[in-house]
Image (tube, grey):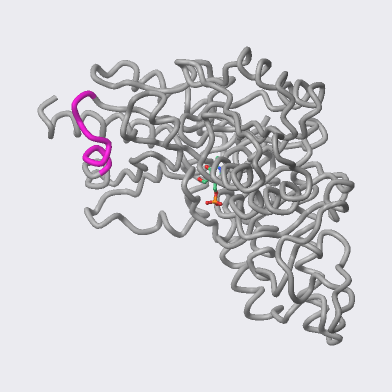
């Protein structure tokens, strides 16, 4: 169903889904200018970071220009105004992810910091020598390294759920490793390296039955599909604003209130205290206890504007749009000899991220030719080196779609693949 979005979003049902990606491009200033080669910019790297719509850029500029002061401390109009806008963004985030209360929303810098916060605060309080933690081979390094550090420090064991040949979590291995009694399972809802969508609600249920808490890394899912922490049933959720049209420097940790309440601070200093004496300090309540120092005020307000933009489009529509682009691109790439696609075949379990390799051509060379064609993709290990190891690859080329992409971008992708093969004599 087409939505009637609030201004300033431009939609029209001429694209493959509920709105036209081509029309939405008009909202993103980055698409106004041609590339160095004089080509139309075909941006297929949303998984790394997304472009910003004018509404977000203007909200950020407006916050700095007219509503900026430090928050939670000024007894004057401007500070009260900034505080109201900052806290309003917190409420918007809570609504966006279905959190029962905005008090469960902690502003952090990014998903990496959110995961580290849990590893430091929850982990160092709740893990003892001999305990187990579980993550998966499918994760971004941000959801591996903090757990490696934690378990090494505490003397606990870290295990990894294996992945299948087509890039899904091996559910038998998951069940077997849950039976070992891990205290926490940390997993991504969507893999940044392969695009796999994990059934996080089902997995959370399995983990809870086994007595494990669940942290969902939503860095690649929150920007692209409806998220509801109550429906997932998880205990913690991490996301980054910059991947969902928002500014960089702002991210979210959501945690169940009783868990956050029981966790000690991660960083200490101003804002996170109620009282300080020379003998000690009394800490503030959540979420402020986890927000030491001056936060990213305008960036939080910008994230609120990004959420308004996404909400106006409808996250179901965003998901449907990307699903159609995925199906088209997956099929088109499959028809080109010499292209190996990674990840699940099924559009229900594959987000708008396609990792692929071209026979005999290094992904860095692929990305270089693509750049010449105006097509921006990521080439490398995608901060998921264990995934590369699993498939015995040094790197892949990754094309990731978002709401401003359309079928012309899919055509540009396949044209760029053919151009690359031609350059390298394929
Ligand atoms: N988790 C996943 C699945 C990601 O794709 C990323 C970034 O690409 C991160 C975590 C880390 O995000 P950030 O660098 O914004 O902290």
- Say which quarter of the image contains residue 395: top left
Q: Residue at x 61, y 68 (%)?
A: 60
- Residue 279 to residue 248: above or below: below
In this image, 57 relative to 274: left or right? left
- The image position of residue 129, as x and y in percent, is 70, 40
Residue 40 placement, left or right of 119 = left
Q: Quadrant of the C terminus?
A: top left
Q: What residue do we see at 60% from left, 55% from top?
A: 110
Residue 149 drawn above or below residue 333: below
Q: Quadrant of residue 1?
A: top right
Q: Indicate yes or no whether the magenta region holds residue 352.
A: no
* Rendered location of residue 138, percent (x, y): 52, 30
Task: Say which residue appears at 37% left-offset and 22% top-offset.
Answer: 341
Q: Classify residue 266 by image quadrant.
A: bottom right
Above or below: residue 153 compared with residue 331: below
Write down the region rendered in magenta.
359-367
Residue 354 is situated, as x and y percent measured from the top left of the image, at: 43, 30
Q: Nearer the viewer, residue 41 or 87?
A: 87
Which residue is farthest top? Answer: 172
Q: Residue furthest left?
A: 425
The foreground one among 401 and 391 is 391
Left or right of 421: which side holds 312? Answer: right
- Closest to the observer, 420 or 190: 190
The x, y position of residue 334, in whole percent, is 34, 17
């Amino acid at each position: 169903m087409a939505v009637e979005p609030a201004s300033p979003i431009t939609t029209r049902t001429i694209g493959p889904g509920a709105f036209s990606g081509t029309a939405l491009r008009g909202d993103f200033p980055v698409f106004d200018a041609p590339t160095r080669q004089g080509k139309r910019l075909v941006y297929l790297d949303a998984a790394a970071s997304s472009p910003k719509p004018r509404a977000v850029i203007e909200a950020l500029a407006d916050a700095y220009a007219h509503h900026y002061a430090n928050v939670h401390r000024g007894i004057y109009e401007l500070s009260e105004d900034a505080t109201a806008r900052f806290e309003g963004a917190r409420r918007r985030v809570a609504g966006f992810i279905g959190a029962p209360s905005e008090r469960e929303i902690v502003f952090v810098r990014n998903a990496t910091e959110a995961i580290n916060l849990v590893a430091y605060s929850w982990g160092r309080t709740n893990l003892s020598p001999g305990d187990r933690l579980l993550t998966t081979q499918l994760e971004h390094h941000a959801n591996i390294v903090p757990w490696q550090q934690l378990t090494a420090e505490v003397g606990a064991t870290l295990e990894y759920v294996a992945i299948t040949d087509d890039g899904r979590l091996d559910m038998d291995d998951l069940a077997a490793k849950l039976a070992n009694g891990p205290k926490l399972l940390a997993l991504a809802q969507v893999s940044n390296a392969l695009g796999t969508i994990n059934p996080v609600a089902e997995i959370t249920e399995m983990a809870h039955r086994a007595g494990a808490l669940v942290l969902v890394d939503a860095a690649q899912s929150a920007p692209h599909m409806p998220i509801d922490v109550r429906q997932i049933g998880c205990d913690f959720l991490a996301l980054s604003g910059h991947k969902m049209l928002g500014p960089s420097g702002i991210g979210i940790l959501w945690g169940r209130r009783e868990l956050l309440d029981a966790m000690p601070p991660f960083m200490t200093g101003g804002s996170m205290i109620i009282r300080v004496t020379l003998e000690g300090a009394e800490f503030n309540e959540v979420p402020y206890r986890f927000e030491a120092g001056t936060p990213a005020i305008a960036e939080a307000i910008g994230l609120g504007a990004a959420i308004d933009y996404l909400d106006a489009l409808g996250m179901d529509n965003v998901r449907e749009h990307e699903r159609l682009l995925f199906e088209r691109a997956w099929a088109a790439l499959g028809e080109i000899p010499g292209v190996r696609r990674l990840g699940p075949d099924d559009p229900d379990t594959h987000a708008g991220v396609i990792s692929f390799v071209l026979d005999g051509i290094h992904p860095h060379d692929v990305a270089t030719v693509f750049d010449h064609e105006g097509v921006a993709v990521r080439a490398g290990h995608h901060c998921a080196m264990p995934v590369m190891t699993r498939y015995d690859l040094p790197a892949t080329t990754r094309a990731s779609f978002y709401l401003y992409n359309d079928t012309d971008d899919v055509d540009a992708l396949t044209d760029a693949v053919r151009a690359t093969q031609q350059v390298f004599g394929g």
